[in-house]
Amino acid sequence: MVEGENGDDGGRRKRLRSIGWWREKMATMVD
């Protein structure tokens, strides 16, 4: 996870996207 790649906002957006992907993956596993 790279912080401040495109400024703080860019890093935050990238983190949210990876978290959303991870949560989707875990939900699929549980289902």
Image (cartoon, rainbow, N blue to C red):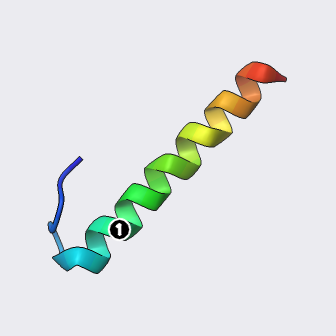
**Left-right relation of 13 to 9:** right
Picture coordinates of residue 18, whole percent (x, y) = 45, 49
Res 25 quadrant in image? top right
**Left-right relation of 11 to 2:** right
The residue that label 1 is drawn on is 12
Residue visible at 18% across and 74% down? 6
Picture coordinates of residue 17, whole percent (x, y) = 48, 57
**Callout count:** 1
Picture coordinates of residue 4, whole percent (x, y) = 15, 68
Residue visible at 66% across and 40% down? 24
Q: Is residue 24 above or below residue 18?
A: above
Q: Which amino acid is tagged 1? A: Arg
Q: Is residue 9 above or below residue 5?
A: below
**Left-right relation of 20 to 18:** right
Picture coordinates of residue 26, whole percent (x, y) = 65, 29
Characterize the local packing of mark 1: few (<14), some (14-19) or many (20 or more) Cα atoms within 10 angstroms: some
Residue visible at 18% across and 53% down? 2
**Left-right relation of 31 to 27:** right
Residue visible at 50% across and 48% down? 19
